[in-house]
Amino acid sequence: MSESAPLSVKRLLEQIKARLEPAFAAVCVVGEVSNFRGSGRHWYFTLKEEGASLSCAVWAGQQRFLQHRPADGQRVVLKGSLNLYVAGGTLTLAVTHCEPAGVGDLQARLRQLEADLRAQGLFDRPKRPLPRFPKRLGIVAALGGAALRDVLEVTARRAPGIDLLIAPAAAQGERCVPETLLALQEIQDPYWHCDALLLVRGGGSLEDLWAFNDPDLVRAVAECRIPVITGVGHEIDTTLVDLAADRRAATPSQAAELATPDREALGADLRRRVEALAAKTAWRLRGLETTLNLLTDHGLQRADPLASAAARFAALSQRLALAHPSRGLDGAAARMALLRHRLARAGSLAAGELDLPRVREAQRRLGPAILRALQQRDHRLAVQAERLQGLDPTGPLSRGFVLALGPDGKPVTRALALPPGAALRLRWRDGERKATLD
């Protein structure tokens, strides 16, 4: 090949691979583990230090030989070989040995910050309860991010009637802390009437989430006027703002679930309560209907079971009021009081001997009128008593009838109601005798 002829990308990488891999077939390197991913068959992570990083991998067949499993924030010593992946042009350290070399710098700083802020009492304050039915929620998140999208989807599904006030803020970098502080200060202003605040961000490495460990931001969350729910990172990520918040959610979606009531669950509970109330009301109305029918005169028509409950109740109440004997007595008493009042007034207005005969005549007619009214009421009461006596179930016994009672003590009204050999109790007017069906 001539010196001026260019190499293809694949050829160049193959030449680098042939010269690089033998020279670094057994290399030892120290650094801090970041962005560890171990959910599949292989483990992948980044070994970094200030200003440099290296991709690392632990293949599935090598994992059981490692004395230590790497984790984010740990400072480790790795042994392995460098592999150049020609198809992707990436350089990877295939790890064959791992041992801890001390806690990583960021992890050590995080623990020191947590100790200092805990000493100030920011994590030990009483947690405020979340509103059960909020009207407006404030959301601090990056515009266009997955965290804000998840929160909007969950709130739209669970509680579409809640107002959402979004205060945008950078999710990482130098702008994250000042913009988040400004958003927190604005949302908790009483002018906006927010009932709770959601501080959310998607997952990331410890470096990506480092802004949410800032002491000023942690202090602002702890001193917020309204309850704060944080959903920063994934379930395994825990920042200092999570410790200062009133409620910590594993993900932004769970933060939205904690802040909103479930429309479907509330609807199911409401339907259950309505059904229970309707059943109790129907049971009560049936009992009142039975009571009114028992108190109603035997000759009057019973309540129509096909009518509505309200109509049946009104009709039975009216019939009972009209049939009650005390109604006539009350009317007679009212008329008698009125006549007495008129008589007293006529007596007080009478002047001279010409009015005295009229007064005496009125007194003479008043007595018989009252007596006749009382006799009419007594007659009606006697008729009602005779009708009630006709409804007495023991009345036919005095005329020679016999009442057959089954084993349960209830009257036997049909010939085939009991099988042959069943025990009966026969009741006459003067006593009872036992019998057996043939």
Image: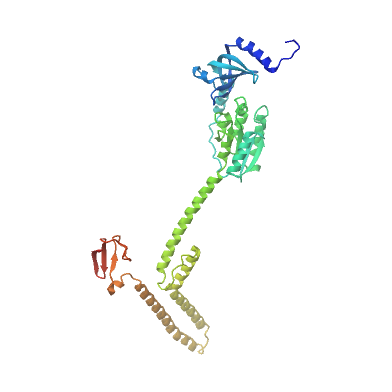
The answer, for residue 322, to whether it is visible in the render is yes
Question: In this rendering, would 217 be left or right of 430?
Answer: right
Screen quadrant of the C terminus: bottom left
Quadrant for residue 18, please give it. Answer: top right
Q: Position of residue 254 (x, y in %)?
A: 56, 36
Q: Nearer the viewer, residue 184 or 402?
A: 402
The answer to whether 33 is drawn above or below residue 421 in the figure is above
Quadrant for residue 426, please give it. Answer: bottom left
Q: How is the image coloured?
A: rainbow
The extreme front residue here reads 1
Residue at x 63%, y 34% (from the top left corner):
146
Q: Nearer the viewer, residue 99 or 247?
A: 99
Q: Nearer the viewer, residue 314 or 378?
A: 314
Q: Position of residue 347 (x, y in %)?
A: 50, 83
Residue at x 48%, y 55% (from the top left corner):
277
Q: Position of residue 103 (x, y in %)?
A: 55, 19
Residue at x 49%, y 67% (from the top left corner):
314
Residue at x 43%, y 80% (from the top left corner):
373
Q: Nearer the viewer, residue 146 or 212?
A: 146
